[in-house]
Amino acid sequence: MNLSLHITQGFVSVAEMICQCTSPVPANRKDCPACGRDCGFPNVRLASSQDEVDALAVRVRQAYVSASARNCTIQLDDFGQSVDHAHAVIARSLKVVDDLAHSDRNHYTSFQAQVHSGSRDPEDNEWDKVRTSYESALYPNFQEKIIFACLTLSGDGISGYGPFSVVLRDEMIAHRASLFEENPHNFIERHQILMNKPIPAGYRAAWDTKSALAKAKLHSAVTTDMLIATEN
């Protein structure tokens, strides 16, 4: 399915909001700088913003028009129900998984945080050379707070990141997780987006609306002869 899942350690980009105390909350803040109130995880605020919700709704309607023309709206509904039970997964090496499994004091941090702390060096490949650029386009000024995972129906992660998969517990990440259409590097390349232009709306979703994004993205792959499990 390869929907990109983004989980905050702290926060993510969203237009400035107004706190309950009427003070503005900057896009890179989870808490109000004036009164300290928790204003919610900014990546979730962004995915739940009206522009994003409306744009995704348009894509979902278009998905159903396409499915109706192919007589497979029932299958598209079933696919959406199956995605409601999908899980977040991170694929890593055995060493990383073993370290996390053997101590509650070991924490999984983002690629950007590891690089900034000096505990990890970027690899000399085409991905790591531009990774900061596209992650900051999605999450300006706080990309180091974002942990990337993928949404899975099978329990398997993306093997390129490691042969072992860690399935994350829904109750631990649902309140701070948002989803993006695909790997940001691939998305920006596919849509030929300049780094000085905003990411178009309609390609993000909050955790509880992940099925809408999945249907918008993958509706063309749904056929009348597909058998789709709708339960865990």
Image (cartoon, rainbow, N blue to C red):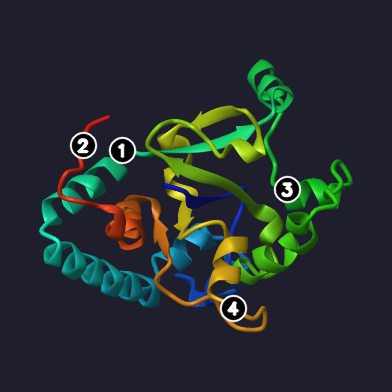
Q: Secondary structure at mark 3?
A: helix
Residue under the image location 32 percent in, 63 percent down = 216
Mark number displayed over residue 85: 1
Whether residue 84 is visible to the viewer of this picture, yes or no, is no
Residue indicated by mark 4: 193
Q: Position of residue 119 (x, y in %)?
A: 86, 41
* Sequence-first disc among 4 and 3: 3
Q: Is residue 210 left or right of residue 94?
A: left
Residue indicated by mark 3: 111
As drawn, the residue found furthest toward the bottom would be 197
* Sequence-first disc among 3 and 1: 1
Q: Amino acid at mark 3?
A: Phe
Are dots 1 and 2 in contact, CB under 8 Å? Answer: yes
Q: Secondary structure at mark 1?
A: loop
User: How many marks do you count on the picture?
Assistant: 4
Mark number displayed over residue 230: 2
* Sequence-first disc among 4 and 1: 1
Question: As rendered, which of 47 and 33 lies closer to the eye?
Answer: 47
Q: Position of residue 158 (x, y in %)?
A: 56, 39
Q: Is residue 117 above or below residue 65?
A: above
Q: Position of residue 227 (x, y in %)?
A: 19, 38
Q: Amino acid at mark 2?
A: Thr
Are dots 2 and 4 in contact, CB under 8 Å? Answer: no
